[in-house]
Amino acid sequence: MNAILINENACLEACTLYFYQMKKIQALYKHRFGPLAVLALVICSISFITRVVLLIKSWPGLELTPLRFIGIFLIGFLYDLVVWSFFAIPVALYCWLMKDSWYQKKGQRILLFLLFFIIFFILVLNAGGEIIFWDEFNVRYNFIAVDYLIYTTEVLGNIWESYNIPLIAVAVVLATAMILFFVRKKLTASQALSMRFAKRSIFFLLFLPLPIASYFLVNNRFKNISNNNYVNELGGNGIYEFGTAYWNNEIDYVRFYTTRNDSANIKLLRNFLQTPNAVFTNDPLSIERKIKNDSLEHKWNIVLISVESLSGDYLARFGNKQNITPYLDSLIPYSLFFDNFYASGTRTVRGLEALSLAIPPTPGQSIVRRPGNEGMFTMGSVLKEKGYDVNFIYGGNSFFDNMGYFFSHNGYTVLDKRDIPDSLVHHTTAWGIDDEASFDYTLQQCDKSHAAGKLFFNHIMTVSNHRPYTYPDGRIDIPSSTQSIDGGVKYTDYAINRFLKQAQQKPWFNNTLFVIVADHCAKSAGKANLPVNRYHIPCFVYAPQLIKASIEQRLTSQIDLAPTVLGMLNLNYTSRFLGYDIYKTLPGNERAFISTYQDMGYLKDGKLVILSPQQKIKAYKPDFLTGSVIGINQPDTLTNEAIAWYQGASFLYKNGRYKGIK
């Protein structure tokens, strides 16, 4: 009860302070630049209401103290003012440049009201978008929002299919009009005061340093006052976070993170990557090594299925009670199943980066999305050199997330929904065609390669487990019309079951490794900044005639899958992978990488080291079930290892040392 009273008092103090600031702003309405005060009132009010709504939504995950509670609103108020300073620029220009003789006319109000209607419309639309985005990802806007804005065909189509857009549009317009109606007199009050151009110029020049200072002096790390990620995110502002993500597509590791000597880093990485069958070159700044096995190479096919948003906790093995992955659950006893397998990031492109390049995440955007990513050393390029037919098969438009360009320039032939015959398609959404169609088309490609006497590597990326979560009717016991996540997961499980059963009838089945792995989890946020449970994903290697079924308990990273699968083939090749062949790696070296676009996590020996911009390093003892963390003293050894892996990956990529072997 005392804790509740303390929080109520803290809330009252925060609200009192907030509205006291609003009262001071109201005195400025009758000034020529009074519209700036009106804009501040509206922006701060909408942001305050949004913050309260998000706080209520995230209440079960919050770990609040009175100071943190007040901090959410005080720091949030700072970011709201920063956003105001940017939106205020066109308003300030209007108030400065407009002559008194025109500004004081009634007809001028049409332009002023139109300007404010546009701004208020953006603010209201943003508030609704932030709430929806929070429901999906439990964070403010980030790289995901930026990417979604770029790929309008898929995203706008997805929004149209998932929500009642006409109703939402009417609601946004009405809310915008209501706000404008309530502040109309405050806006027109600025017409009462005459002000010469010289004096207006002084006020404009006094205003101008505010957005300039906001741009250069404020960053989105100010809000991080707690180990609880919900607290930190609530203190932010979605529009500001969107701008930050947009301008920081790639973050230079050396400039923003703690560094060590490059030679020392590569030396440490070479030690970790040393295996009995690996011989390194003499270049001390290279991880290039020849993988040479004593026994013959296996001439096996590979089908790699990367499943959209397949969280580990969807499986019954990891506690799910909804029976939404019945087939995958039944497949575990017959597969090599990785019990402690972790995704590198929170986006499909980050998962595809890890699965193809076997490289730890580098700060900023995935390499799949960056310029200059051609000719990289990939799993596909290795197998292509071995004479395999290598395909990347995607049920959507491969333009999305630059997937088509990346894979087509790195050893793969890209086949997407434009290549898949309409006769195979049962259902279509903005994201692409149903998984059944993609799998049926994959079967055709496998048959084609086999008939030509060639081995094949087909990497499939599914799309059905994605909002709006609709799929062909009559497949599972959850109707498509419910548009539920559970339905999307269960349909993909059904499609994989159908695919493997059809594959069992093929002459190439007994000579094929089927690898099933998630690209990332469905949810990425939690109480901690990097909640480890939000990166735990399933991974299967199913080949009943080739691989002994077992449960692999060792900690494994998504970047380890490619070298491990190539190791199962006893493949001899020259490697630049930073991933491990888990069955050749010395015990005790196991580790995993988890990341956002800024925070780089290194998971080893039950500890988590996080490298962040501004040379920040923190260490934690994570709870692998809940994702919560307890701060610990920095373990020097693990810290140096974390720096070596992340700085080393950045160094190798930046210096062209992760390009393909000629």
Image (cartoon, grey):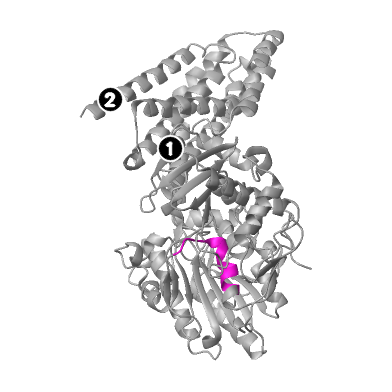
Question: In terms of image quadrants, where is residue 461?
Answer: bottom right
Q: Which residue is nearer to you in this view: 189 or 372?
A: 372
Q: Position of residue 588 (x, y in %)?
A: 50, 59
Query: Residue 207, relative to residue 396: is it above or below?
Result: above
- State the predominant SS element of the stretch in magenta: helix
Lower position in the chain sequence, tag 1 or tag 2: 2
Q: Is residue 179 above or below residue 186?
A: below
Point out which mark residue 227 bears. Answer: 1
The stretch of residues the image draws in magenta is: 554-566
Question: In the rendering, at what x and y percent does residue 306 appear?
Answer: 53, 67
Is any part of residue 101 visible from this angle?
no
Instruction: State which quadrant residue 69 falls in.
Output: top left
Residue 72 falls left or right of residue 203? left
Q: Relative to the observer, which residue lies in front, 136 or 613? A: 613
Residue at the spot of label 2: 6
Distance from Cα at disc 1 to Cα at disc 2: 21 Å
Q: Is residue 248 left or right of residue 168?
A: right
Q: Say which quadrant the C terminus sits in.
A: bottom right
Q: Is residue 555 magenta?
A: yes
